[in-house]
Amino acid sequence: MNERAPLMSSAPFADVRAFRTLSRAVALCLAAAAVVVVATPASAQLRRNDGPSLTPRIPGDRALSKELKIAGVPTTSDYIVAVVNQELITHTEVDKRVSRIQDASAPGTRLPPFEELRRQVLDALIDEKVQISYARVIGLNVGDAELDQAIENVAAQNQLTLSELRQRMAVDGLDYDRYRSSLREQLLLQRLREREVTSRIPLSEEEVTNFLATDPAAQTETALNLAHILITVPERATPAQVAQLQAKAEDLQRRVAAGENFAQLVKQHSDDSNTRNEGGAFGMRELSRLPELFVNAAQGLKVGQVAPVVRSNAGFHIVKLLERESSAQATYTQQRARHILLRSTPQADTGVLVNRLNEIRKQIVDGQTSFAQMARQHSEDGSGAKGGELGWASPGQFVPEFEKALLSLQPGQISEPVVSRFGVHLIQLIERREAQLSDAQRREAARSVLRERKFEATYEEWARELRAAAYVEMRDAP
């Protein structure tokens, strides 16, 4: 059995991130302009940091994330605004979705007028209900075990046990069963869209050949995956305040350059709420889609290095280069790592496993033992006998949670416990290297780009066809 199998994602190595041209987000909520965009199976690996996560996080100690509030409790003033096949859309459901969009909007974002935003939200909810109804007709479902694991991941990522998560939801007046139902629907929508839309995208070998021969993206496009820590400077800051904030940024830059964990410093200090939960990462983007200030800062950096502090209108930035891609050179980054895996079971609470790995990590960091020795003693993966060694891995080869943690590490560093569908991992990055893409890999990467370019239009056509065949009844307010 392949020792790496427990970490494998469902995406094939065809998802090598050599070419990227479009950004997108999973269509679980509306974007600022209320346009629904979806992700292909390939892009799920290619661009895992570009869009909102399927499993919402809980940002603070006082309240649950707004993303959980779609599962809130009904009110006495609630009423039905639309019937879609046998699915209902309520006034409260629309209100909560509108509120979530408003709360998630970055400062300065111009949303449509309220009534127009509400109309767009209702329109998108109708599409969702049509698709959920269709998924049930064709027999798609999300099992209880998969749903339980997704919820456990939410709890563990927020350093809560499952019982603590339920208690927090109860304190905030949120219904746990409604939350489960809402999350099940979102997972079902993702699965349906990936299955139905991808199969409708026509793609010939001639198109792939022409793309590689003529498309600028295949010839000269260069993309970067950057991460940053933002120290905001208030609009009316005094010179003394500016100097204090600059000193803070420069201190953080020195700490990162000395090897301190960048993702951890992001969580503790970054004022950018859009990237804080992603380790500060923007995801792989073309140079044209990155601020020129950041592109200039990254020039001359090697993967894993951090630039000197730079200043923008927003404040001070500590910029780190996570990955670099040049399709003209057709290379990609490989990583060699080791890990310790403790598998989740009904008898082993995820929070307990996280605590065990924290204790193991402390022993290793304190020099009491080695990572390899602890992997041999404790790891429940086949790699344990080899000290947790996983060998050289290419992009998309590990599940997203594992790969995201790996990208945030410097060689020699050890991650915090990482929760995946297989259990809880402790990861150590050994080294990175640049590898040359084979011709077959270049062609498969080109297919991923071409599918992504066609996906949105194909999705919209498919969604229109489904809706045209559905029963939709709009209802007035009582």
Image: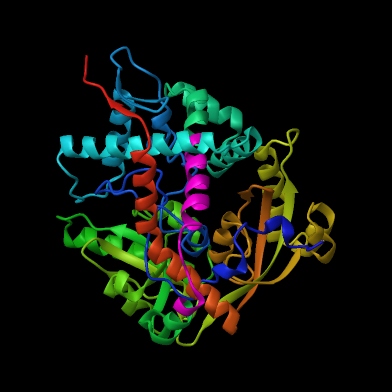
Q: Quick check: 228 left or right of 363?
A: left
Q: Which residues are magenta?
A: 184-207
Is the image coloured rainbow, by chain, by secondary structure, or in one colour?
Answer: rainbow
Q: Is residue 471 above or below residue 292?
A: above
Q: Is residue 380 above or below residue 286?
A: above
Q: Quadrant of residue 403?
A: bottom right
From the top left corner, tell me how far across and down residue 66 is, in percent: 37, 36
From the top left corner, tell me how far across and down residue 268 is, in percent: 44, 52
Q: Is residue 438 above or below residue 13?
A: below
Q: Is residue 104 above or below residue 409?
A: above
How many marks on residues? 0
The overriding secondary structure of the stretch rendered in magenta is helix
**Residue, x 41% and y 43% (percent of image)?**
28
The quadrant of the picture occupied by the C terminus is top left
The quadrant of the picture occupied by the N terminus is bottom right
Report if residue 227 is visible in the image.
no
**Residue, x 42% and y 59% (percent of image)?**
280
In this view, which residue lies farthest toward the top? 76
In this view, which residue lies farthest toward the front? 469
Q: Quick check: 102 left or right of 193?
A: left
From the top left corner, tell me how far across and down residue 448 is, in percent: 49, 68
| Viewer-proximal residue among 268 and 170 | 170
**Residue, x 43% and y 39% (percent of image)?**
131
| Viewer-proximal residue among 137 and 331 | 137
| Viewer-proximal residue among 18 and 100 | 18
Report if residue 271 is visible in the image.
yes
From the top left corner, tell me how far across and down residue 412 is, in percent: 64, 70
| 279 in magenta | no
Q: Quadrant of residue 240?
A: bottom left
Q: Quadrant of residue 84?
A: top left
| 198 in magenta | yes
